[in-house]
Amino acid sequence: MPLQAARARTTTAEAAANEAGKEETEGVPQKATEIGSRLGSKFPITNSMIVSWIVALGLIIFARVAMKDVKEIPSGAQNFWEWMVESLHDFLEGIIGHHLVKKTFWYFASIFIFILFSNWLGLIPGFGTIGWGHPTTYGFHVSEPLFRGANADLNMTLAMALIFFVCWTVWAVQAHGPMGFLLHLFAPKGDTTGALKLLMIVVFFAVGVLEIVSILFRPVSLSFRLYGNIFAGENMLEAMANLVPGFGWLLPIPFYFMELLVGFVQALVFMLLTAVFTMLICEEEEGHAKAHH
């Protein structure tokens, strides 16, 4: 009996140690944590929503402060803000053209700046260590962090992709009209007659169906690309921090610089893909505008 009791205690201790070790190495959970009840709210607020609000509010305040007293020769915050906006405008104008960038720049600039600073805010050391948790044999474990990278939540990236899909549809209808939009997708291109024209109608109708499928999948690909890269980066930093006890502050440093670049590249990729998708559907209108010029 004493031997069985000792074995039971040993097994229990090993299980507790394994569970604690598992909690320490499980990384960033795929699902954002709901913390609304912790903050006294009945609304389902998640930690990624908190970060998105912080980024949006910070950008609005910074823009207001930077452009409060506009000077002819900018300096300080105004200089930085004007440089960033003008650089984005010139970059996009070289890709999608003057007429189209004039109509859509508000969206592309906003989405790039928001994604970029959301990605970089999630890289601040100690970002995910503030919250609620419990003590373990390895130290205090935060099971419900107060903050989580906004783009490490699939709900956030999917919401941005769906907003673009709505804007894209509006811009396409504005460019071609409701019937012209359908003809742009399904009507045959080129001048043909007779049986060849009938064949081209069938071919381009099939191509239009495939194009519709492709259009419907764009929000999925946009959201998963951004979410996957940011979520993987945060998990990698978490793994590096827990790889060697006592050196959690040192090992992730080289990877922080890489994630800074990844955060910028992913913001740029999201903006460029949405800009190119818009250009492809509005290219006829842009071509007419250039002809008038």
Image: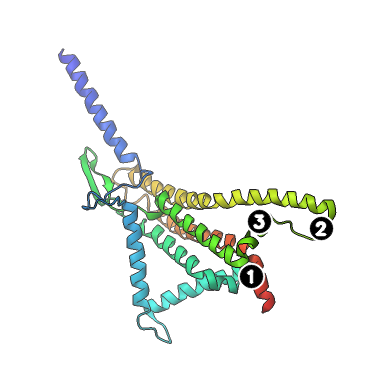
| 200 over 276 or under it: above or below | above
Report the residue marked by disc 1.
286
Q: Which of 18 and 283 is in front in this view?
A: 283
Mark 1 Cα within 10 Å, few/some/many (few <14, many 20+)? some
Mark 1–mark 3 distance (CA, rounded to whole Å) = 17 Å
Disc 1 vs disc 2: Cβ atoms closer than 8 Å? no
46 vs 154, left or right, is left
On screen, residue 105 above or below 229: below
Whole-percent x, y for residue 210 in the image: 64, 48
Q: Which callout, 2 or 3, points at the residue further toward the start of the chain?
A: 3
Residue 97 is situated, as x and y percent measured from the top left of the image, at: 61, 71
The amino acid beneath tag 1 is Glu
For the point 39% across and 81% down, the residue is 75
* First along the sequence among labels 1 and 2: 2
In the rendered image, the quadrant that contains the N terminus is: top left
Give the left or right position of residue 142, taking residue 95 as reference. Answer: left
Q: Where is residue 261 in the image (x, y as percent from the top left)?
A: 46, 58
Residue type, numbered disc 3: Leu
In percent of width and height, residue 155 lies at: 41, 50
Q: What residue type is labelled 2?
A: Thr
Under tag 1, what secondary structure?
A: helix
User: Does 271 appear above or below 79?
Assistant: above
The residue carrying mark 2 is 192
